Image: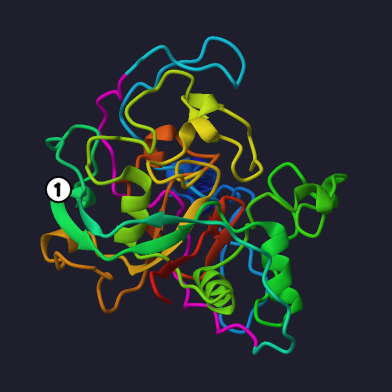
Amino acid sequence: MSGRRVVYRLLPAFLLTALLIVLVQTVVAQSQATTYLPAVLTDAKPPLPAATMTTIAPSATTTATVAPTATTVAAASPTPTTAATSSPTATTAPTATASATSAATATTAPSATPGPTPTSSITPLPCETVRVPAGTFQMGCSTPSGGICADNEFPLHDVQLDEYFIDKHEVTNAQYAQCVAAGACDAPRQISSYTRDPNIGGVPYYGNPTYDDFPVIYVTWDDATDFCTWAGKRLPTEAEWEKAARGSSANGVFPWGDELTDLCSRANVKNGSVACVGDTTAVGSYPLGAGPYGAMDMAGNVWEWVSDWYQSDYYTESPSSNPTGPTTGSERVLRGGSWVHSYLLARSGYRDHNVPGLYGHSIGFRCAVSAGD
């Protein structure tokens, strides 16, 4: 009997101890489950890359947003065998699947506010233009889907344009600085270029006489419009830009034709994974890449704003005579490619697009004027 009494007395303590052990194991298990959650369930995000493309936000003078994302073109670019100035041996443009996705991705933002009212009467620097005669040309692309054309380049269609003049070169730093001095233009959002940056021990790009003849960059669509208006001109329409680049027919893939031999002697672009230069070059540096009417740098160097709103299927409904683009939209058209993007985006028919408040180290413009204006 005394043995049973001892067992009965010890049983509650034993059960309590067992219960405590189970409770501790449960807590430990839950703690481990929380500690070792799979990484895919966490909300951690990698840091954003350094910003090189920016959009203007309301009541803001500088905003760091996202870096540009070059459009991927699913084609093997000719691979240079030496330095950045080497060129492929192909003689015709390769077949590629081009995308209508914008080459410069930016967050959506409203357009910049209009530029300041002119306060002085500075005469614009002489800006040479080339004459583009009245007549019909073929706009767009005829290559079947899956070829070198992007979907927004179809269909190939005839367009009649009146006579006009277009700047022979992209607007330069020196020319734009005059507009700023006159109070008619806002200064570029940065004074640097990709490799010329005083913030990292380099020299300024804008305001430096060494780069007076280089294209102005870090300008929005509104900045470009302000300058052209001050100079007594306007931005070219998308149709005017394309005719100046390709001539009266659509046979040439680039302003100089279809040749890819010595590509880096014709345009400041990226050849495969190698940049021909790696930054902007002085306007007019590539006479071998001139267009049929004499306009320079219509392929590469910097993207160029044109006046049109962007609409992907606009070619299916655009008027056949002097089209000026859709009446409304959220993005403006950019043309010509740049030093930082593949030569396939520098095709005369390639249509890029982005919000008008975008600016960056590869965006500039040129102006046009109607005959008789």
Q: Magenta region, mostly helix, strand or loop?
A: loop
Q: Quadrant of the C terminus?
A: bottom left
Q: Position of residue 257 (x, y in %)?
A: 33, 31
Vertical relation: 153 (above or below) 273: below
Write down the residue under mark 1: 156
Secondary structure under tag 1 reads loop
Inspect the magenta stretch and tell me whether residue 101 lies in it.
Answer: yes
Q: Position of residue 272 (x, y in %)?
A: 46, 24
Residue 127 visible in this rendered orientation of the protein? yes
Q: Nearer the viewer, residue 245 or 304?
A: 245
- Its colouring scheme is rainbow
The residue depicted at 38 percent of the width and 70 percent of the height is 371
Horizontally, residue 173 falls left or right of residue 366, namely right
* Residue at 29% in and 78% down: 328
- Depth check, front residue: 169 or 6: 169
| Residue type (three-letter) at the residue carrying disc 1 | Leu
Residue in the image at 45% along x and 41% along y: 299
Residue 1: x percent and y percent?
47, 44
Give residue 84's quadrant in the image.
top right
Instruction: Name the outermost residue toward the right.
Output: 201
Range covered by the magenta-colored residues: 92-116
**Is residue 212 shown above or below 4?**
below
In the figure, 155 relative to 114: above or below? Answer: above
Is residue 267 something one can see in this rendering?
no
Residue 320 in percent (x, y) is at 14, 64
Work out whether residue 2 or residue 177 is closer to the camera in this orientation and state it: 177
Answer whether residue 111 is magenta in the image. Answer: yes
